[in-house]
């Protein structure tokens, strides 16, 4: 399989890449990469990813905009301190001025002076199912976004380009959901206990068996909250004396779980195999700090699809390194399960990998399955261990029975166990919509990040003023989008993040694309010049030298 770090790893052996690149397509940063499966002559699906650089003037004006905003922020703070301008932010009471501060004024500077100016673009309340179309409650602010009031007007039939409803299964009630209604009538809404006590139902066992069958693994365990699936189970797997190697763009739930574990954490550059191999090799050679003892475990944490970049993990290369250095691999498939692979079985199927190559499968039911909760899957001894030691199993309330039934219904639909091909058709429709939407955006001249197969499509806007204008103008055109900025992204890489769904019709996508085309011209955000990454240290593997 291809190793982007300057060589090719085939069955754990490092080969010279110069010869390798003559035999196959083997290029970097947005070009085709083809890899072979261990012990199999079949090619993996070509991986095409793009991380294009913005023109220099765009970056200059972006930083200039933040600089001007910061200067005016200090001026307004000065006016507030002297009582000239009303301060709406939380402040210490006068009688507690000698106490240790509860609110750190400087730490809230960005929120108070920059975020508040464009706050109306976030937390917009909707009042319908998050399908391809949804309804938004109109709200206005009379004090520059410090508070909002509802007008009573409902903005109907807004095209939903922001929800993680990849397969369109988060929808309002129809007859296909009768089993969910029956589960509600039979079990009620809540369980009122943990899995260790009175909270394990037959529905939970049925769901866990189905998840294991879906992933082709020995066993699985489900949890009521996706975020807690990571943050509460990683500490049960590793602890003091263990080493976690985490991709720098991992989700906050993985970061929190790693920190709570007490293990040593080291970060490798995003999807950069040379960076990862350097950390693995150093860990094996030097062991733990000071004592130089061998690490008890080395656990690699990655995601299937990275939700802010739209990139897909380089699983074949990571598996090769994991085997070479005898590490464990934990894959978070929150966004990739149901949305990748010919039958929706995630990044493992996307690369035609053996499930036994991954030690811990994690995923959530909040995206493709239209429900909530998460799962851990893998070998039976792993799952049995977590049943006894997981914090979620011991302290968290079990998954609601109607939610469990909704997941069972959705998973049977995807697997074709309902006697139809609707699930497969949804997976195929999602892939078709994703390719169409990404291709059209690229042709229009926008800079978009990520893999061509990823239904998460980040469109780079850069400047904070354009982020606000972009979202506001699109809502006026009845298009709902998610815009993301610092601190969720690097300061100068604010973006709109589109989530493509199988429920989107071609007419819907064309309407969105037409509006985006006009918006791109209006706001001058068609920056694409087909150049390399704005952050080569993330995506250019040659930035790391491996010593012999």
Image (tube, rainbow, N blue to C red):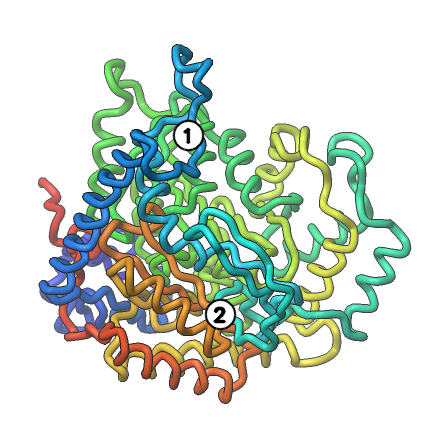
**Foreground of the two, 54 or 68:** 68
Other residues around mark 2 within 10 Å, as few (<14) / some (14–19) / many (≥20): many
Residue at 73% in and 54% down: 404
Please name which of the two marks, 1 or 2, marks the residue nearer to the observer.
2
Image height of 491 relative to 213, above or below: above
Q: Quadrant of the C terminus?
A: top left
Distance CA(mark 1)–CA(mark 2): 35 Å
**Foreground of the two, 226 or 147:** 147
Residue 227 x, y percent position in the rendering: 54, 43
Name the residue tied to disc 2: 480
Residue ranking furthest to the right: 186
Which label number is shown at residue 259? Answer: 1
Proximity of marks 1 and 2: CB atoms separated by less than 8 Å: no
Q: Is residue 478 left or right of residue 206?
A: left
Residue 507 x, y percent position in the rendering: 50, 89
Q: Is residue 218 left or right of residue 249?
A: right
Q: Going from the N terminus, do you reach mark 1 or mark 2 first?
A: 1
Residue 185 x, y percent position in the rendering: 89, 56
Q: Quadrant of the N terminus?
A: bottom left
Residue at 40% in and 67% down: 471
Image height of 501 relative to 274, above or below: below
Residue at 17% in and 64% down: 53
Image height of 468 relative to 377, above or below: below
Residue at 76% in and 70% down: 173
Tell me which corner region of the image, top left, top right, bottom left or bottom right, holds residue 113.
top left
Residue ranking furthest to the front: 84
- Per the image, label 2 sits on a secondary structure element best described as strand
């Amino acid at each position: 399989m291809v190793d982007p770090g300057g060589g090719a790893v085939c069955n754990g052996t490092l080969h010279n890449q110069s010869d390798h690149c003559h035999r196959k397509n083997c290029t970097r940063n947005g070009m085709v990469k083809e890899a072979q499966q261990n012990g199999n002559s079949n090619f993996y699906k070509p991986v095409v990813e793009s991380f294009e650089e913005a023109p220099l003037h765009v970056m200059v004006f972006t930083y200039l905009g933040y600089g001007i905003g910061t200067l005016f922020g200090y001026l307004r703070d000065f006016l507030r301190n002297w009582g000239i301008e009303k301060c709406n932010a939380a402040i210490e009471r006068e009688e507690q001025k000698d106490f240790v501060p509860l609110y750190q004024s400087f730490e809230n500077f960005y929120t108070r002076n920059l975020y508040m100016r464009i706050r109306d673009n976030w937390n917009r309340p909707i009042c319908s199912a998050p399908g391809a179309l949804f309804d938004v409650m109109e709200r206005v602010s009379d004090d520059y976004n410090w508070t909002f009031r509802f007008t009573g007007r409902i903005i109907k039939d807004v095209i939903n380009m922001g929800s993680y409803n990849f397969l369109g299964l988060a929808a309002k009630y129809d007859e296909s959901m009768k089993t969910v209604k029956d589960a509600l009538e039979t079990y009620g809404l809540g369980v009122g206990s943990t899995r260790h006590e009175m909270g394990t139902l037959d529905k939970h066992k049925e769901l866990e068996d189905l998840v294991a069958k879906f992933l082709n693994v020995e066993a699985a365990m489900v949890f009521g909250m996706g975020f807690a699936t990571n943050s509460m189970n990683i500490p049960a797997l590793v602890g003091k004396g263990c080493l976690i190697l985490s991709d720098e763009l991992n989700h906050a739930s993985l970061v929190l779980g790693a920190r709570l574990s007490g293990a040593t954490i080291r970060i490798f550059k995003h999807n950069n195999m040379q960076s990862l191999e350097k950390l693995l090799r150093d860990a094996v050679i030097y062991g733990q700090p000071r004592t130089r003892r061998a690490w008890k475990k080395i656990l690699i944490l990655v995601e299937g699809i990275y939700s802010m970049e739209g990139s897909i993990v380089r699983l074949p290369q990571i598996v090769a390194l994991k085997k070479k250095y005898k590490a464990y691999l934990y894959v978070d498939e929150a966004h990739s399960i149901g949305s990748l692979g010919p039958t929706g079985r995630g990044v493992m199927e996307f690369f035609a990998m053996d499930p036994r190559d991954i030690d811990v499968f994690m995923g959530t039911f909040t995206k493709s399955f239209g429900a909530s909760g998460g799962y851990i899957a893998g070998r039976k001894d792993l799952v049995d261990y977590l049943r006894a030691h997981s914090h979620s199993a011991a302290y968290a309330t079990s998954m609601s029975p109607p939610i469990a039934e909704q997941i069972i219904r959705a998973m049977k639909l995807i697997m074709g166990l309902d006697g139809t091909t609707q699930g497969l058709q949804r997976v195929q429709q999602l892939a078709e919509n994703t390719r169409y939407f990404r291709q059209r955006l690229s042709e229009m001249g926008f800079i978009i990040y990520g893999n061509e197969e990823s239904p998460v499509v980040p469109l780079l806007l850069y400047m904070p003023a354009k982020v606000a204008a972009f979202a506001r103008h699109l809502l006026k055109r009845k298009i709902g989008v998610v815009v993301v900025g610092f601190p969720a992204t690097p300061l100068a890489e604010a973006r709109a993040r589109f989530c493509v769904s199988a429920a989107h019709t071609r007419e819907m996508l064309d309407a969105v694309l037409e509006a985006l085309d006009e918006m791109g011209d209006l706001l001058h955000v068609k920056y694409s010049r087909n150049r390399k990454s704005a952050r080569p240290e993330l995506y250019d593997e040659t930035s790391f030298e491996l010593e012999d």
